[in-house]
Image (cartoon, rainbow, N blue to C red):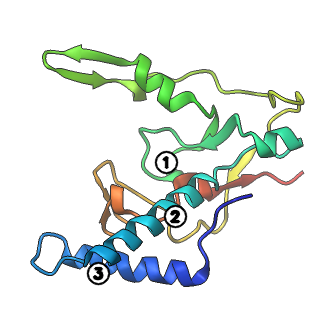
Amino acid sequence: MTIALTPAERAQLTDLSARYKESRGTDHELDQASENLYWSLFRLREIELLCTAPTPACCEAARTHPAILYDIASSVNAPGEDPGRWYLATHSKHTQARASFRSGGWIECRWAEVEPPSPKFCPYCGAALPAMRLKDPLPRNICNSGGEDWCETCDSRLRDCLCDLPWSAFEPEPG
């Protein structure tokens, strides 16, 4: 079962998000109860977004235990700049860990430079993964970072962005 915000919770989150952005760094910060509600709803929105990742729908196991997802490259900021591809769901965390190295007193990572092979088949039933295409028209509220720490769509820091993730711009090709 997918977690989804109710329309009332979505409206509350939108209102609290606007108030939170306005109050940050001022003497008029949100009261503790409002801030707790904001972060609780924000966490539900993050879960909701992660559950929207395109995954194979060829068998029940692929639908209930996603091992593969469709996304754009992590170094790309907008769906129109990358045709996307299938990834192993663990790709980014494992790649980031393996591409990390010490540089003086810092730990740096060159994970965007490492591209693993793209899966071609469902690991559960062996069915070929579907070809994907950009939706036409593209959804309006897709996060676009422009390579910075800000979303150009909602004008928020990425950590506060409530926009849909870039993978929501893709759908299976018909046929």
Q: Is residue 119 left or right of residue 49?
A: right
- Residue at 39 percent of width and 83 percent of height: 15
Nearest to N terminus: mark 3 or mark 1: 3
Q: Which mark is residue 19?
A: 3
Give the amino acid at mark 1.
Answer: Glu
Quarter residue 127 falls in: top right
Find the distance from the CA under tag 2 to the CA under tag 3: 17 Å
- Of badges 3 and 1, nearer the viewer stands 3
Q: Secondary structure at mark 2?
A: helix
Q: Residue furthest left?
A: 27
Task: State the separation of the CA atoms marked 1 and 2.
Answer: 25 Å
Residue pointed to by mark 1: 81
> Horizontal and vertical percent for residue 106?
18, 23
Mark 2 sits on what residue? 45
- At label 3, counting other C-alpha atoms closer than 10 Å, the crowd grade (few under 14, some 14-19, many 20 or more) is some
Is residue 162 something that shows in the picture? no
Q: Which residue corresponds to the image point at 56% horizontal and 84% vertical from the top-left?
A: 8
Residue 153 picture location, percent across and down: 39, 67
Disc 1, SS: helix
In this rendering, which labeled residue sits more in front, label 1 or label 2?
Answer: 2
- Pick the residue in front: 94 or 73: 94
Q: Nearer the viewer, residue 34 or 59?
A: 34
- Tell me the tag on residue 56: none
